[in-house]
Structure formats: structure tokens, C-alpha cells
Amino acid sequence: DAGVIQSPRHEVTEMGQEVTLRCKPISGHDYLFWYRQTMMRGLELLIYFNNNVPIDDSGMPEDRFSAKMPNASFSTLKIQPSEPRDSAVYFCASSLALGSSYTFGSGTRLTVV
Amino acid sequence: DQQVKQNSPSLSVQEGRISILNCDYTNSMFDYFLWYKKYPAEGPTFLISISSIKDKNEDGRFTVFLNKSAKHLSLHIVPSQPGDSAVYFCAARRKGGSEKLVFGKGTKLTVNP
């Protein structure tokens, strides 16, 4: 398996623009997680899905953030409109079970100017 | 309220010496602990774990120690190598495995040649 695949690796956008981050989890993993990493907060869980259904989105910072998982092999995290404070590295991870080890993708480094 | 704390943002050691990374937790319901390692421009990768029924788990140069009474765990790397330079995240899981992992903010380890 190629692991968790995220795209793009880097994204630079202007404030106010829509940004879409993409993730392909490991096949067979029932859980998918979106994390954001910043110096101040470390790894923050934004939202997670179980069998394509959003379970906990309490970490989503604002209504500007939304996430979808239309099928078992694809998820998106969208920010609209983007702001400079959204600049961070966003990770997608997947796992077989909620409490088991997570496999992370390589991340998307987002810069909003 | 941070349930998993890594109080040292950074640590610097000489090659060949021991690296000790610390992690404290507040939730007595945690029963499984993991360490992840993260290189720049990559996602975190699973390193080693320990169950609360043990007080030590060893894998090559890496050993994790758990002190349940103190709610403290530590990762020992002996001997340290320059390739160990990375950010290390501690994570914990509640009993039953039905809840998501809780991550600390990470400690950046630098091993100097």
C-alpha cells in the first residue's frame, strides 16, 4: 500500500481564496482524521470520520472550515475564505480502529498571504 | 485542558549519548501510550508504544518507560544518532480503545555529531 496520500504538498494562496486539501486513506482503514500542526498548538485534531461519516468536528476552528468524505478512498478539507492565520501544515491520517496507531500522510503546507 | 503534556519544546544531545524525552498525562483512564517521530516535510510515523500493564517496552535503541503512579512516561534513545533528530510526539488512549488518541505538542530533538 502506498500509505496515506495527500495533495497538494504545498499550497500558497491569497487571503480570501478557497483552498481544498485532499486525502486518500489506506484501503481498509475505517477511520480518517484531519490534523493541523502549528508551533503554538502542536497537533490539533480538526475532524474525524468513521466509515465516511463525520463523527467529531469539534476541533474545526470556524465555519470557514468544512470537510467531506464522499467515499472510503477520498476526503477533502476546504477553507473558504482562507485567512493568513490558517497557514499551517495539515495532515490526514487513517487507522483501522479509533484507538489504534494512526498512519499519517506527508502533509500539506498551506501558506495564506 | 491539555491531557498530554510534553513540557520541553526542544532537547539537544551529543551523538552517542542518551536522549530522554518526557511526557506527562493527567487522565488516569489512559491505558495505552504511543510515541511518534516526525521528520521535516514528512508526516509523523509510529515509533513505539506501551500498554499500562507494563512499565517498560524496548525496541532496539528505543525504550519507553511508564510510571503510572506519577502519570509519566519517557522515551530513551541509546545511543543517540544524528538521524534521530526529529520532533517526537507522545500520544495516549483511553481504556477500551473507543476514543481517539490524544497527542502532546511535541519535543524537537537535535542530535549533534
Image (cartoon, coloured by chain):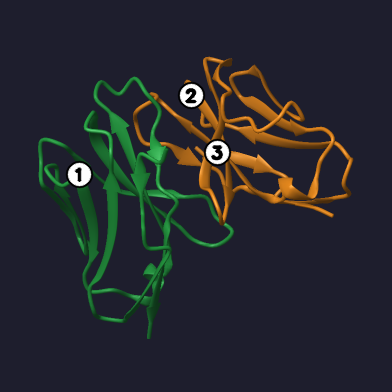
Chain colours: A orange, B green
Give the SS element for disc 3.
loop
Nearer to the camera, B44 or A111: A111
Indicate the amino acid at tag 1. Answer: Lys
Q: Residues within 10 Å of mark 3 (few under 14, many from 20)?
A: many
In this picture, is B35 found above or below B20? Answer: above
Q: Is residue A107 visible?
A: yes
Q: Nearer the viewer, mark 2 or mark 1?
A: 1
Q: State the image coordinates of residue B66 (x, y, percent, origin top left).
A: 16, 48
Q: Assess disc 2: are there few (<14), some (14-19) or many (≥20) residues with their C-alpha within 10 Å of its C-alpha.
A: many
- From the top left corner, tell me how far across and down residue B108 is, in percent: 43, 65
In the image, which is nearer the foreground, mark 3 or mark 1? 1
Give percent across and percent down for residue A61.
Answer: 65, 33
Q: Residue at x 74, y 26 (%)?
A: A63
Mark 3 and mark 2: span between their CA atoms?
12 Å
Specify the label residue A31 is tagged with: 2
* Mark 1 chain: B
Q: Chain of mark 3?
A: A
Discs 3 and 2 carry the same chain letter: yes
Mark found first going from the N terminus, 3 or 2 = 3
For disc 1, the marked residue is B71
Which quadrant of the rendered structure holds the C terminus of chain B?
bottom left
Q: Pinpoint the chain carrying mark 2.
A: A
Residue at the (59%, 59%) spot, across then down: B41
Label 1 element class: loop
Q: Disc 2 residue type?
A: Tyr
Q: In the figure, B106 relative to B2: above or below?
A: below
The residue wearing badge 3 is: A4
Give the alpha-carbon distance from disc 2 to disc 1, as whole Å. 28 Å
Q: Nearer the viewer, residue B66 or B5?
A: B5
- Toward which corner of the image does residue B63 lie, by quadrant? bottom left
